[in-house]
Image (cartoon, rainbow, N blue to C red):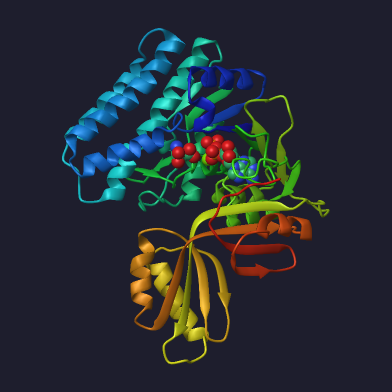
């Protein structure tokens, strides 16, 4: 059995759904197809949540209409008529939106945003059936069970394995279509796994079912040595070890969700990153690798960073106690540290700009002199060489840097990027 995952870009229109069907039709073995919400639907659903929670009814109606019209066009193009299951889902959404919201934003988010995935998989499944790729639509919430940390739910692995294992074992179907990104608690409340979480869903399913592979179909030829939207010369990497891939997602490479790799590595299941645009071409294989694959420099850019520097008010050293206090404050305010640097009298961190850092800084100021620089960018170069470093930092203002054996990292003042 293989697990395939198709992201929003791959099913953004009717042609995308047809292309997905083409790809799936080339295989003969059992496949579970995990699909995200279509195009940018999750962003649109987030706007619906915001309008619902703030009781901005005019905006709410406009956002809901927009989402419905977008899907209606795709359904019309694929079927020439309405789909009952999709209409039923919109009725459920309307009923939910008529009710009074609770006070828990994250809970309400998880009750609304998953309609994107429920609708997209209903359309894909119906289309595959229409062209005689018989398949079963699975409501993944019956199988992937989580705790109740809404918007960032944690998987209950044993239960998920039992439920999904017995469902698939007792089933002779070759093809299943199901949702990424969502799950549910033991008490059947819908949860989500965090934005971009569909890659992770694919890995959960592959792990608990001991799949042969997880294959994620993207609008790029595979994992490239940089984000092509930033670095136009980016080239495909044929093979990566799990270790290297985890490092890249940790540094912020957005091509794979960071949680995806562990469940696969633990069962030695290869991850294939393929192109849905050129599906016959070989993408990137991520697997255990004995030998050291000879790697070219890989670049990861994180934009919109803030560099925060702290020094003790009484001129004392930065010691373990002060570090422990600092980490507690960041953890409490859920601020993720992208880079850390310490010296005798100073500790600095690079973090994503967000509303949360203001409250963290306020708390740190009780104990430390805190300075911060906004509008920074953090560039990581794995397997750096001098040419790669020059290419990144020439003509830039370097505010901080950290160089280890395999990795060079630079905090730069944000500026335009132009590569020769
Ligand atoms: P999906 O919707 O399938 O999850 P994403 O948009 O999350 O797709 O991921 C694919 C995008 O990731 C590509 O379009 C590309 O712009 C971006 N990307 C960032 N870094 C890389 C990289 N190192 N290699 C390939 N793509 C990258
Ligand atoms: N649809 C969700 C999102 O856009 C999950 C995913 O696409 O991975 O975040
Ligand atoms: Mg993604």
**The C terminus lies in quadrant:** top right
Q: Position of residue 408 (x, y in %)?
A: 68, 63
User: Splitting the image into 4 quarters, where does residue 84 fall?
Assistant: top left
The residue located at (68%, 57%) in the rendering is: 381
In the depicted structure, whether residue 174 falls above or below residue 418: above
Q: Position of residue 288 (x, y in %)?
A: 74, 50
The residue located at (74%, 53%) in the rendering is: 297
In the depicted structure, whether residue 167 falls above or below residue 106: above
Q: Is residue 94 left or right of residue 225?
A: left
177 or 171: nearer the viewer: 177
Q: Where is residue 115 in the image (x, y as percent from the top left)?
A: 35, 32
Q: In this view, does 227 lie to the left or right of 39?
A: right
Q: Position of residue 122 (x, y in %)?
A: 42, 23
Q: Which residue lies furthest to the top in this view?
A: 80
User: Splitting the image into 4 quarters, where does residue 360 fall?
Assistant: bottom left
Q: How many marks?
A: 0
């Amino acid at each position: 059995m293989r697990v395939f995952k198709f992201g929003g870009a791959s099913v953004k229109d009717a042609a995308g759904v047809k292309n997905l069907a083409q790809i799936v039709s080339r295989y003969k073995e059992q496949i579970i197809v995990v699909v995200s919400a279509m195009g940018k639907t999750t962003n649109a659903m987030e706007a619906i949540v915001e309008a619902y929670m703030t009781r901005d009814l005019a905006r709410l109606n406009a956002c809901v209409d927009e989402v419905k019209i977008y899907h209606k066009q795709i359904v019309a193009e694929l079927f020439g008529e309405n789909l009952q299951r999709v209409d039923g889902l919109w009725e459920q959404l309307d009923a939910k939106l008529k009710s009074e919201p609770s006070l828990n934003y994250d809970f309400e988010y998880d009750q609304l945003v998953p309609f994107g995935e429920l609708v997209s998989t209903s359309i894909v499944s119906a289309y595959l059936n229409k062209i005689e790729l018989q398949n079963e639509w699975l409501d993944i919430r019956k199988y992937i069970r989580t705790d109740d940390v809404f918007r960032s739910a944690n998987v209950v692995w044993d239960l998920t394995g039992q439920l999904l294992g017995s469902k698939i074992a007792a089933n002779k179907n070759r093809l299943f279509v199901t949702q990424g990104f969502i799950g549910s608690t033991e008490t059947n409340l819908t949860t989500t796994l965090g934005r971009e979480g569909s890659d992770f869903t694919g890995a959960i399913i592959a792990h608990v079912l001991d799949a042969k592979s997880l294959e994620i179909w993207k609008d790029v030829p595979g994992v490239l040595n940089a984000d092509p939207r930033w670095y136009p010369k980016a080239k495909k990497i044929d093979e990566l070890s799990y270790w290297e891939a985890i490092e890249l997602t940790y540094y912020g490479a957005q091509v794979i969700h960071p949680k995806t790799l562990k469940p696969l590595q633990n069962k030695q299941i290869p991850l294939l990153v393929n192109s849905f645009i050129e599906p016959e071409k070989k993408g990137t294989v991520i697997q255990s690798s004995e030998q050291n694959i000879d790697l070219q420099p890989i670049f990861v850019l994180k934009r919109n960073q803030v560099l925060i520097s702290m020094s003790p008010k009484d001129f004392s050293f930065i010691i373990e106690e002060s570090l422990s206090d600092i980490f507690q404050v960041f953890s409490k305010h859920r601020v993720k540290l992208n880079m850390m640097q310490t010296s005798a009298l100073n500790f600095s961190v690079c973090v994503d700009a967000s509303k949360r850092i203001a409250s963290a800084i306020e708390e740190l100021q009780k104990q430390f002199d805190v300075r911060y620089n906004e509008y920074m960018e953090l560039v990581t170069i794995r397997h750096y060489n001098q040419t790669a470093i020059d290419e990144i930092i020439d003509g830039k203002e370097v505010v901080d840097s950290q160089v280890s054996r395999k990795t060079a990292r630079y905090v730069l003042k944000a500026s335009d990027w132009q590569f020769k």
